[in-house]
Amino acid sequence: MNILVVAEHNNSVLNAVTHNVVTAARVIGDDIHLLVAGSNCSAVAEGAAQLEGVTKVMVADNAAYEYQLAENVSLLIAELGKTYSHILAAATTTGKNIMPRVAALLDVDQISDIVAVESADTFKRPIYAGNAIATVHSNAPIKVITVRGTGFDAVVAGGSAPIEAIASVHDAGNSAFVGEELVKSNRPELTAADIVISGGRGMGNGENFKILYDLADKLGAAVGASRAAVDAGFVSNDMQVGQTGKIVAPNLYVAIGISGAIQHLAGMKDSKVIVAINKDEEAPIFQVADYGLVADLFDVVPDLAGKL
């Protein structure tokens, strides 16, 4: 079976989640082609060619793909994808924007957010905010799939796949890139961090997140937040962890002032070790925590940071 993996990148560096998607592809088959669509993205292609298991890298380098506009990239993927049995992308904001369009263009159903591969046509995916796992069988001639990166280990470098230029250019003409505001931080990116410290409504206000930032800096950790904290305006929504936010599975997840609503648990319960700090001993977060501390976060978090 030949498999097309859509690379996620910023035209300079391949996003780490693509490594996890390649691992999922290797479970399905061993003829894996990786598509890099962007502008001035040769460095991304060179990095992609080193991923173990990738047999070919295709590069569509054109201004039409510079910002990975879904309207343009989906047309390219649908054109190339007709000769593949599977098309895979990460279940990120970008992947979730592009892949439904690809499925529609190919007139097939999409399988979303898989966390395991049973066979070439059978997959497992979470439903009901992660409270159940559905086994999905597809008879579609081309299987269009988004992959939850936390469900698969990252593939390592060690390959040397050939790189092929793709001349096909698609500009749908019905969308344009306007601008972006990037949050600059010296802390690790949330979905790639080994340690994540998250705050919830119990933080009280946005200024109180400073005590989490101080703790995170001591641990080299990323900082996240629950939806309640984001909805309350404490922090920006790019920090949200949960079903409608970012899915994380770090080695250590510290939930501070977070009650543990189902929506939040769906985004972090695959973490290797979970620590919860909450003054409410009945908080649902303690049901999934490996270690729990019933205490006032404004007392214990600064004390913990001081000891570190």
Image: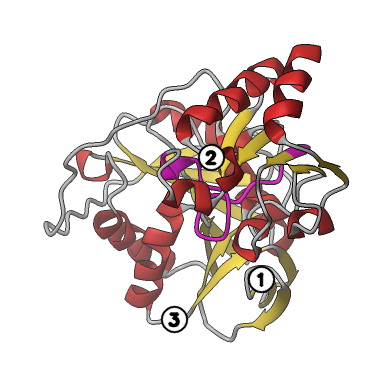
For marks 2 and 1, give the CA distance: 35 Å
Q: Which residue is mark 3?
A: 108
User: Nearer the observer, disc 2 or disc 1?
Assistant: 2
Q: Is residue 54 magenta?
A: no
Q: Quadrant of the C terminus?
A: top right
Secondary element type, mark 2: loop
User: How was the colour assigned to the protein in this rendering?
Assistant: secondary structure
| Rendered position, 184 above or below 57 | above
**Circle 3: is it few (<14), some (14-19), or many (20+) Cα within 10 Å?**
some
Mark 3 or 2, closer to the camera: 2
Q: Position of residue 293 (x, y in %)?
A: 84, 40
Residue located at (73% from left, 75% from top):
132
10 Å crowding of disc 1: few (<14), some (14-19), many (20+) = many
Part of the protein shown in magenta: 236-253
Q: Is residue 250 magenta?
A: yes
**Secondary element type, mark 3:** loop
Magenta stretch: helix, strand or loop mostly = loop
Residue where numbered disc 2 is placed: 204
**Three-letter amino acid code of the residue under disc 2:** Gly
